[in-house]
Image (cartoon, helix red, strand yellow):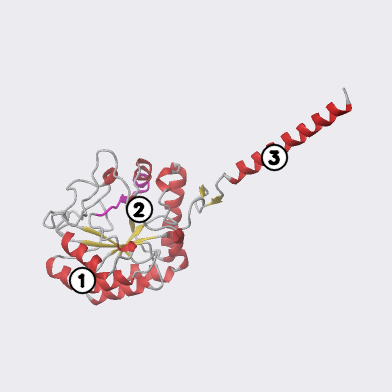
Amino acid sequence: MSGATVRATGIVTVVLAGLLASAYVLGRSLVPEQHATTTGVASSTAGPHYADQPPSTEFPAAPGRALPDTSPDADPSAPDGGGDDGPGPFGARTATGSARVALTFDDGPDPRWTPQVLALLSQYGVKATFCVVGENVESHPDLLRSIVAEGHTVCNHSWRHDVNLGKRSPETIRADLLRTNDAILAAAPDAHIAYYRQPGGAWTASVVSVCAELGLTPLHWNVDPSDWKAPGATTIEATVRTQTGPGAIVLMHDAGGDRSGTVAALQRLLPELLSRFELEPLPVDAP
């Protein structure tokens, strides 16, 4: 073999080795980082952090299920506040089951907004349901204790508000929900966790199946003022006022961004809603 041929062969070998090494590094970078949960099951930490993603509620319903009608033209006299009279996506709960109305607050606890919401609820003697994010509970256990001590219902809202959690493996979903439950109980051992609300309302059969295993009722809503978009107190108030009917579950947020509009709207809404309905926390002994 000539010297030129040997040199050419050597160059090709080096190039191929470099390409293989690059492919290996790229492949490793695409594997989600894993961490051990309190239950010993590894779950993925891939995906955007809670604070980096909007708490979107614009997801399609499951096949054959209609999402609640929250349009301005919805009939406010309908029993469920103008939405579909049946169950929500994948059978998630969308009504209280009585003429009473439930206010729910997602994504907290938050050191700025949650105390303001709690103060308003206390002022009017109203109990509500707080769908809490695990990592926020871990950061602010005192606020979770206040929620429980004041008689509000606590709902699991995932560890870090991963809107794609339902697309992950059942093992990952289970670890996420259990980790959040553990954080809630670490902060408030007497808390009763009967509900789970999927971030973004992005329900899947896998999420609902894990909820059944863990004894959690999937909790949706049928009144959504999209307050997470911060449309202003007037818009939030008008949507809740016109769309809330007997049995409604109202979705609002006490974290995840500027919630001054939500707080201002709530201050005006509470006396009006109390004049029309009984307001209740969702029962901890969920059916």
Residue closest to the eye, 67 or 106: 67
Q: Position of residue 243 (x, y in %)?
A: 17, 59
Select label 3 or label 1 by which is in front. Answer: 3
Which residue is denoted by mark 3 in the rendering? 21
Q: Residue furthest left?
A: 77
Label 3–label 2 contact, CB within 8 A: no
Residue positioned 60% across, 46% down in the render = 29
Q: Is residue 61 located in the magenta-colored stretch of the structure?
A: no
Which residue is denoted by mark 2 in the rendering? 200
Q: Secondary structure at mark 1?
A: helix
Select label 3 or label 2 by which is in front. Answer: 3
Q: Quadrant of the N terminus?
A: top right
Q: Position of residue 22 (x, y in %)?
A: 67, 41
Residue type at numbered disc 1 = Leu
Q: For the residues marked 1 and 2, what is the alpha-carbon distance in whole angstroms?
A: 25 Å
Circle 1 residues within 10 Å: few <14, some 14–19, many ≥20 = some
Residue 65 makes an appearance in the image: yes
Q: Secondary structure at mark 2?
A: helix
Residue type at numbered disc 3 = Ala
Residue closest to the eye, 158 or 48: 48
In the rendered structure, which segment of residues is drawn in magenta? 211-221
Which residue is denoted by mark 1 in the rendering? 270
Residue 237's image quarter? bottom left
Position of 139 with respect to 287 (left or right) is right
Residue 16's image quarter? top right
Sooner in the amino-acid sequence: mark 3 or mark 2: 3
Residue positioned 17% across, 68% down in the render = 273
Position of 117 with respect to 75 (left or right) is right
